[in-house]
């Protein structure tokens, strides 16, 4: 169940170059490269002639030349050269995907190109800020929704991440509010006057109790923006603090489906420290992210393995799952809309 | 085709501890651990909330706490804590398996708990005897019945084990009797006045011809008890020998299904030597078992591979297959009984 | 879609010995070995008793003895010994394949033995000539027809093999003729007065422009004979040259299906140099074959992977695909003939 008429984060900008690279997104092979003017291109990664991955080929100016028999395709997917013949038959083209580079990311639109609207790309302007602290892309062996489930219920931090950023208080005593706003869900979780978890002590320097917040916002198809941080207990964080009084971060998490059981997990984090903190010290937090995410990914892949043993087994929802339920409802509604629109279009075509 | 209302050997006692471990038995995920009083526990290894393996979690007193969101289950499978809420919904439970520790083994009952009767556990009292010589558990890539086929026809010893415990005489000149007694089959094979095979010469010290016996008894679901040994030819072994005049062993073999194509093979062996033999010398036989079983397992896994190439290909039965046919008939009868009983129960429930 | 009533190249002669070896051809397990008089034998590699690969067994005179329970099969596939019993039941036999050794190759006939005619074996007499330069058998992960597609359109040499034997001129300026003659297709490709590719310069010593030819002939089920070479541009190669004036090779390529997605790729090459060339120098070409084939195989396996992503995606034919289309038509026609003949036979049997 993949939404198609949405922008997906396909790659970090610097990984797409003049050397074509092959990917799979939403079960479809895609080759990405840059034109001579650096504009990114995304084409179906399958020569229309003999079905070899085009990503094995070479660029010639702005075209990609199949490594097998030399057919060349331009950035629109049209074949512009077939060695040994003048005529280009109508079958000789591959799908071209709308693709936009923005905020240090390459965004791919797998759906109807006529609907692709770059204004829908999430605002990640902070991502190109020097404050951007760390980022990564990990190929994971699970369905992308397991990532969204995880991010929509941060009560898991108290257990899965108990060795670094979690304390049981997060799940037991959190003040959780879930707001659904159109296609977006925001889950805010405040934990007041509790001891700091190990990583907060080590990298944030908190030695007394803290007020802590995690504010996660979902946007379809699979993006979570998370603001989180801490301040000395009772210093007024809940009512709004000046920037210099808090220790806070902005993170983005994006799960891009590869197949039904594999995904790319993109994440990035930037700090938002107050002026009276030493950025060098605070940046100690960044490397922790790799370990935290490794714990999440370990859980996702184990879940997938467990689900595959018997996919018919049910799940249940707990109180903390308000965000998860909201997220899934939005995905289901949007998916049904896409299917209905497609049926109507098909109907019109048929009539 | 797995029997469910039977005890399966699930683990050697010493491998189940306060550290939860995950298994798959009969296609179902199972987590096993010990309570503080050392009693073993076996639960469905899948949290009812988000379907993560519970075996990734930690024990808290006698409960197991899911590593993802902290749901805790007691040894009956009931969820007793959901972080962040008071109410425990009815879906919040996992299956609990009857489990018994006896004779150094953990026995698991995958069927209807109401029918679990510990008196049906096979008598392996000798297994906890200091005489227990060697044992192992091997994960093998084949359907469990291939193991039973093997053990019900020990004529294979003459070929598959020709390098250690076999001689062609075993298959060619054996005196074989098969007795079916209710749900049990006993195959006894006597080979009189033949040269000793290599391992018998090396570890049993036989330099002249021997009378040799192999008496294998099947009990459902997948247990073979095997008594085997040798004595000097003509010394009266067939008519019953005093213990001190024979060189004999007791072995148990148990195949526990993991999936349709993987199994655990448990085996153990104890000696039963006469008093006038040096146990240290005789125990030379034990290490041979690892090599003998490696030959068997090599054949099983090759059979499974061969079967998978075309499962429709038939098999045929030879004279030596009396035990195999008897064993399979019992399994088939018991399986049909279980299915019929289940249908009746379902019917009653429906009405 | 495999043709059955044809000879397949199953092994190089020297690899079939008195030590039985297991293979899979056309999805069927086959064991091959030699009788005491060195005649090759090919039997179904699956004991009729318990379905173990016979290739795990040992030879006894001209029979193969199953390693599990000692059943022995003669070269006709008849079971001739079952340990412990006199009677040989009718099920106790395995399929025997017609097999012929000729030209240093073992040829296997997977179809109706009554139709096996050794005169249909391709003439590879040159293959046992001391001039035979290099050969190999590679197990590749693709459907065998991808190999035939490759060999029927040598325009790919200009792209896939650009690093060694290819130049773009091959595809762009070749003079290609395709002739279908019954069950055979010949594609001849001449490229006149063009620079020599790297390997031709290095191993053939061509420093000026060359006239170059590639003449590939397909014979079912999956054999390509290829003659190729070069001569100084304008020296009259197109009109027929004396042997001493050309630098030319004879190659055979044979793709034998293992399964639907794996194959054996056999190839061999012999030189056919003029007398005024130094064979030692010219033979420099032979090792290049391994690298050239590695490029082909890389493409085949990538194609298979790409096809598996969505087998419903179409292909298209370009001008250079005349040989490919001819080859496929022959295969399809022969396959339909085999199916129809089988239906008729089945019908006769039923009536």
Image (spheres, coloured by chain):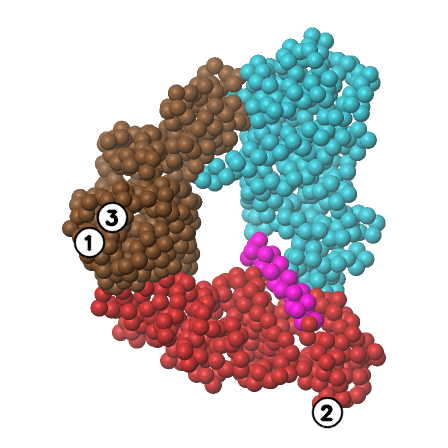
Chain colours: A red, B cyan, C brown
Residue B160, position in %: x, y?
57, 26
Residue at numbered disc 2 = A242
Q: Secondary structure at mark 3?
A: loop
Magenta segment boundaries in residue numbering: A288-313
The chain containing the residue under callout 3 comes to C
Disc 2 from disc 3: Cα separation = 86 Å
Residue drawn 57% across the image and 41% down it: B141
Q: Quadrant of residue C159?
A: bottom left
Would residue A291 be counted in the magenta stretch?
yes
The rendered magenta stretch, by its main secondary structure, is classed as helix
Q: Secondary structure at mark 1?
A: loop
Residue A205, position in %: x, y?
79, 79
Residue drawn 23% across the image and 60% down it: C193
Same chain, labels 3 and 1: yes
Check residue C235 in the rendering and tell me which mark sits there, or answer none: 1
The chain containing the residue under callout 1 comes to C
Instruction: From the viewer's perspective, tell me whether residue C81 is left or right of residue C249.
Output: right
Residue at numbered disc 3 = C246
Q: Is residue A239 visible?
A: no
Q: Residues within 10 Å of mark 1 (few under 14, many from 20)?
A: some
Whether residue B188 is situated above or below residue B89 in the rendered picture: above
């Amino acid at each position: 169940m993949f939404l198609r008429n949405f922008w997906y984060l396909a790659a970090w900008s610097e990984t797409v170059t003049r050397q074509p690279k092959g990917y799979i997104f939403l079960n479809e092979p895609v080759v990405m490269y840059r034109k001579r003017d650096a504009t990114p291109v995304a084409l179906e990664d399958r020569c229309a002639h003999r079905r070899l991955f085009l990503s094995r080929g070479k660029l010639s100016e702005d075209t990609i030349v199949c490594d097998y028999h030399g057919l060349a395709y331009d950035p629109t997917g049209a074949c512009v050269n077939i060695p040994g013949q003048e005529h280009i038959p109508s079958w000789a083209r591959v799908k071209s995907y709308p693709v936009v580079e923005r905020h240090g990311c390459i965004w791919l639109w797998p759906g109807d190109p006529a609907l692709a609207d770059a204004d829908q790309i999430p605002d990640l302007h902070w991502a190109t800020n020097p404050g951007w602290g760390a980022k990564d892309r990990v190929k994971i062996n699970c369905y992308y929704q397991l990532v969204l489930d995880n991010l929509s219920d941060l009560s898991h931090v108290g257990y899965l991440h108990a060795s670094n950023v979690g304390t049981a208080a997060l799940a037991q005593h959190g003040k959780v509010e879930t707001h659904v706003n159109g296609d977006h869900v925001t889950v805010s979780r405040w934990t007041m006057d509790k001891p700091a978890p190990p990583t907060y002590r080590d990298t944030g320097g908190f030695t007394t109790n803290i007020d802590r917040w995690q504010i996660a916002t979902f946007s379809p198809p699979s993006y979570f923006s998370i603001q989180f941080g801490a301040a000395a207990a009772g210093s007024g964080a809940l009512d709004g603090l000046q920037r210099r009084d808090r220790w806070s971060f902005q993170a983005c998490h994006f799960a891009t489906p590869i197949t039904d059981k594999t995904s790319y997990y993109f994440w990035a984090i930037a700090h938002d420290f107050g002026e009276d903190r030493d950025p060098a010290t605070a940046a100690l937090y960044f490397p922790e992210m790799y370990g935290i995410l490794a714990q999440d990914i370990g859980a996702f892949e184990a879940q997938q393995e467990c689900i595959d043993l018997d996919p018919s087994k049910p799940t249940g929802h707990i109180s903390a799952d308000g965000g998860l339920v909201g997220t899934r409802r939005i995905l289901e509604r949007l998916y049904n809309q896409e299917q209905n629109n497609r049926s109507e279009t098909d109907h019109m075509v048929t009539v």
